[in-house]
Image: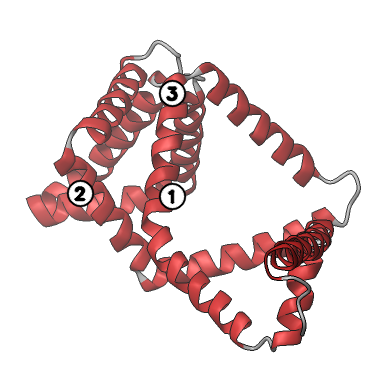
Amino acid sequence: MLQSGRHQAVFDAALLELRAVMVAKEEDLKTAIEARVRKEGGALVGWVAGAYTARKILTLINSELERMEPNDSALRQGFERWIESEIARLETDPERIAAFGRAVRQALAHPAVVDWVADVWQRLRDALATDAANPDGRTVALLEAAFGNAGSLLADDPLARHRLNRGLEATLVALLPAAQLRMAEFIGGVVSRWDAAELVDKIELRVGKDLQYVRVNGTLVGFLAGGVLYLILDALFGRVVH
């Protein structure tokens, strides 16, 4: 997102939402500021300066939000530097990585978040099912674009390929012991239910022509070996009587 400049779009969305909240809640904010001024300075100060202070504060906030509009604003540059520093820390600082992981786990474990995620997933699943039934739906187009972007990234970025490989290796190493045990139990259970005839049939089905070749060769070799032994015995001891 940072390399493509998408973070600035996120920043724009946050500013737009903040300005909308400021407009919608302006009267409530004025009332809250006036109440705080009265609480800190007394009824007289609140009556004299409360409304003025509230207007000045809100005007200052709105002017700061408007100043953030240009792409070269100092706040935008600071926002970008902060993201870059956080990316670097998440890649190199074990303490930061651990703290971030804890924060994510705590947030995901909160009951409100769990309910929200479940509701989002249900609505997303319903929307995807509806869209999948549409031949011109957006799901396929989005998946094609996502896989295409991922393919381009992996083709052009050796570091991304290395990270993907390391991630897959770590996942397989973590899953293989349990998968190996379950596969062994599954195969053992299936084979134990076969009888001799079924086992022979399955072997013949898999081996096919090779098994027939082995059978014919075995018959011919046995015939020739028996004939040779018979001739040797007959030459040495005369006609063999059975």
| Residue 118, percent from left and from top | 54, 69
Color encoding of the figure: secondary structure
Q: Pinpoint residue 165: horizontal percent, then vertical percent.
A: 44, 36
Query: Looking at numbered disc 1 in the image, what kind of residue is underneath it?
Result: Lys
| Callout 1 touching callout 3 (CB < 8 Å) | no
Residue at the left extreme?
41
- Residues packed near mark 2 inside 10 Å, few (<14), some (14 to 19) or many (20 plus): few
Nearer-N-terminus badge (1/2): 1
Kindly identify the residue that appears in the image at 15 percent across and 54 percent down. 38
Q: Say what amino acid the circle numbered 2 marks.
A: Ala
Judging by the rendered image, the residue that carries numbered circle 1 is 25
Q: Mark 3–mark 2 contact, CB under 8 Å?
A: no
Residue at x 33% of width, y 47% of height: 30
Where disc 3 sits, the SS reads: loop
Tell me the crowding category of disc 3: few under 14, some 14 to 19, or many 20 or more residues within 10 angstroms, Cα based.
few
In this view, 45 is above or below 9: below
Dot 3 or dot 2: first in sequence order is 3
Dot placed on the residue nearer the N-terminal end, 1 or 3: 3
In the rendered image, the residue lying farthest to the front is 238
Three-letter code, disc 3 = Leu
Q: Quadrant of residue 231?
A: bottom right
Which residue shows up at 41% across the image and 42% down it?
167
Image coordinates of residue 59 in percent, x first then y, are 34, 31
Q: Is residue 42 visible?
A: no
The residue beneath circle 2 is 99
User: On the image, numbered disc 3 is attached to which residue?
Assistant: 2
Q: Tell me the quarter of the picture where residue 75 sits.
A: top left
Q: Of all residues shown, which one is farthest toward the right?
A: 135
Q: Residues within 10 Å of mark 1 (few under 14, many from 20)?
A: few
